[in-house]
Image: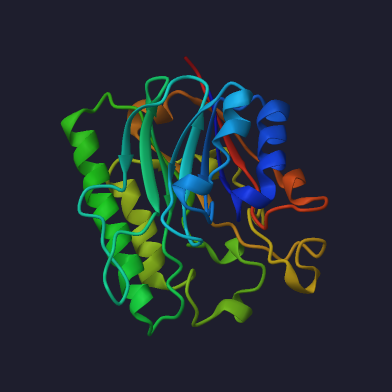
Amino acid sequence: MRLATWNINSIRARVDRAVAFLERSGTDVLALQETKCKDTQFPFEAFEAAGYEVAHFGLSQWNGVAIISRVGLEDVSLGFPDQPQFGEEPVVEARAIGATCGGVRVWSLYVPHGRALDNPHYAYKLDWLSTLRSHAAGWVEADPAAKIALVGDWNVAPRDTDVWDMAVFEGQTHVSQPERDAFAAFETAGFTEVSREFVPEDRKYTYWDYQQLRFPKNQGLRIDFAYTSPALTSAVTAVEIDRDERKGKGASDHVPVIVDIAD
């Protein structure tokens, strides 16, 4: 199986690029984040015409997650259990969707941004990650043979070299120690972040802002990752960050992270 995760930054603006990526890369399962549409607005037909099934969770023009698969799409979950809520009238945001695809339980995750260290969104982010981690640990404990992939835009840069200049990010979200600790806690639950295992080089980014020529200057962030359970980690054979997908007209500000999994 070839599994990819990609913050598409509006699926309606980039549906053609997404379908072209699937065809070009031979991806079997694509986890999307930031689709920025309601379920009724998602372009299901384009993917179905290409031979894929789609599960989407979208409530508004913000957030939104999807799983697109040509190897089966079963037991869809909109959000994970006890997922923290946010807002003036707290709601479960469209930030997590799970489905079983070809024997792998795939979760497409769009972790809250955090906004600022003194913003309520930051506490929400830490609670969100902690709750997900607790459930992930429970899933593995209940079934050590379970093949689980937690993939997506984590909005955390775990290392200083995962941002182009730490001096620019000092005192901001994504690089604070509590966020990094919350990200690393998935390792203590038995998961392995496989993109780092296979692409260990520093300054291999997955996101570049549209402003100030960040992409040609390679002033990016590495914030898109793939955590795999022990049974799945042993089956991972390769990981690629598809930097070329950031090139050209109409590109997302993120690029796909592609994970190859043996039978």
The percent position of residue 63, horizontal first and vertical second, equals 47, 58
Q: Residue at the front extreme? A: 40
Residue 228 image offset from top left, x and y in percent? 40, 37
The answer to whether residue 241 is above or below residue 219 is above
Image spot of residue 153 (x, y percent)? 50, 53
Q: Residue at 67% of width from left, 68% of height from top? A: 164
Q: Residue at x 40, y 54 (%)?
A: 95
Image quarter for residue 22?
Answer: top right
Seen at 45% across and 46% down, the residue is: 39
Total number of numbered discs in the rendering: 0
Q: Nearer the viewer, residue 81 or 203?
A: 81
- Snapshot quadrant of residue 55: top left
- Percent x, y of residue 162: 59, 61
Q: Residue furthest top?
A: 263
As rendered, which of 127 and 250 lies closer to the eye? 250
Query: Is 154 situated above or below 75?
Result: below
In the rendered view, how is the structure colored?
rainbow
Q: Is residue 83 above or below residue 228?
A: below
Residue at (27%, 47%) from the top-left corner?
80
